[in-house]
Image (cartoon, rainbow, N blue to C red):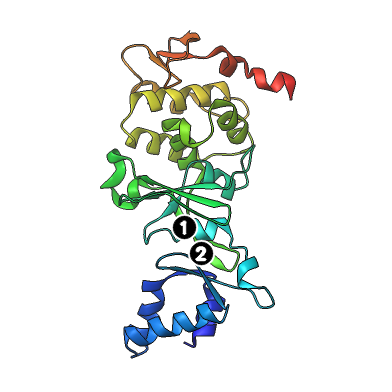
Amino acid sequence: MRPQDYFAEHPVFRVEDFQRVHADEGGRSRQTTASLLKQHLAAGNLVRPRRGLYATVPRGVAAADAVVEGFLLATQHAPDAVLAYHAALQFHGRVYTPWSRYHVLSAGRSRPWSWRGVEVVPVLVPTAVRALPGWGGGVEERRYAGGVVRVTTLERALADVLHRPALAGGWEEIWRSLEQVEFFDLDAVVAYALRLGSAVTVARVGFFLEQHRETLMVEERYLAALQAQAPSGPCYLDPGQEQGRWFERWNLVVPERVVTRSWAEVS
């Protein structure tokens, strides 16, 4: 494959992926491949957002002015990187407030980084699902803007943002975002929520589904499956232990503003 053809099909790519095609499969040395990338970088055909990562500059655009799609940039953070939490909801078009910060799941530790207004924040895959096939499920590949994005499904995102609400902007952002979703595969939601192994998360998911029972057509069997794994003692919806109303079924103390969705009164 000619380098220009590879660049056209991969708007954002990692060096090792290009080397595998151009050097390993093409019979060239890795030194030759590295030199070629440097030439295209100097010619303004490529930009390098960070070490080991390149993006194609559209024809007719100066390299200094090139805008790289954030979803593509984030999903190439690492070979296993997956858009998750608020970033996953945003990719699926279901957020109240768009961000330029993208959280990505990865099995390896690494530092956040940013480039031209895009901030990529790696998050370790939750311990309970790290060793499971597909990290517990709910990860898919989607074609997007000429490339491929790895992203969690809406079902996994629902449980994930309730598992770690700080990565989704807090309760108002979470509620307003999730309420934009017209349909969830509830079997997938419940199965993944249980795999996370957190009674508090199970209670949060159960409370959300019960609160939206009519709009999401939540059958009792889903709530019963979650209730069976709910906390044995009182716990808080909010990690900061914000006071509120106690819901016996979930042994969950929920802030009054979440119970009443008070933000909707002033929108």
**Residue ID at (29%, 46%):** 130
Give the mark toward the camera: 1 or 2. Answer: 1
- Helix, strand or loop under label 1: helix
**Would residue 89 be seen by someone viewing this image from the given angle?**
yes
Quarter where residue 21 is shown: bottom left
Q: Where is residue 175 in the image (x, y as percent from the top left)?
A: 58, 29
Quarter where residue 69 is shown: bottom right
Residue occupied by mark 1: 75
- Helix, strand or loop under label 2: strand
Residue occupied by mark 2: 148
Give the alpha-carbon distance from disc 1 to disc 2, as whole Å.
Answer: 8 Å
Q: Given the image, on which type of amino acid does mark 1 rest?
A: Thr
Number of callouts in the render? 2
Image quarter in which the C terminus is found: top right
**Mark 1 vs 2: CB contact within 8 A:** yes
Q: Residue furthest left?
A: 131
Q: Given the image, on which type of amino acid does mark 2 rest?
A: Val
Q: In this view, does 247 lie above or below 82?
A: above
Say left or right for 178 vs 252.
right
Q: Position of residue 201 (x, y in %)?
A: 39, 27
Crowding at mark 2 (Cα within 10 Å: few <14, some 14-19, many 20+): some
Q: Is residue 215 above or below residue 251?
A: below
Q: Where is residue 113 in the image (x, y as percent from the top left)?
A: 45, 52
**Would residue 25 be seen by someone viewing this image from the given angle?**
no
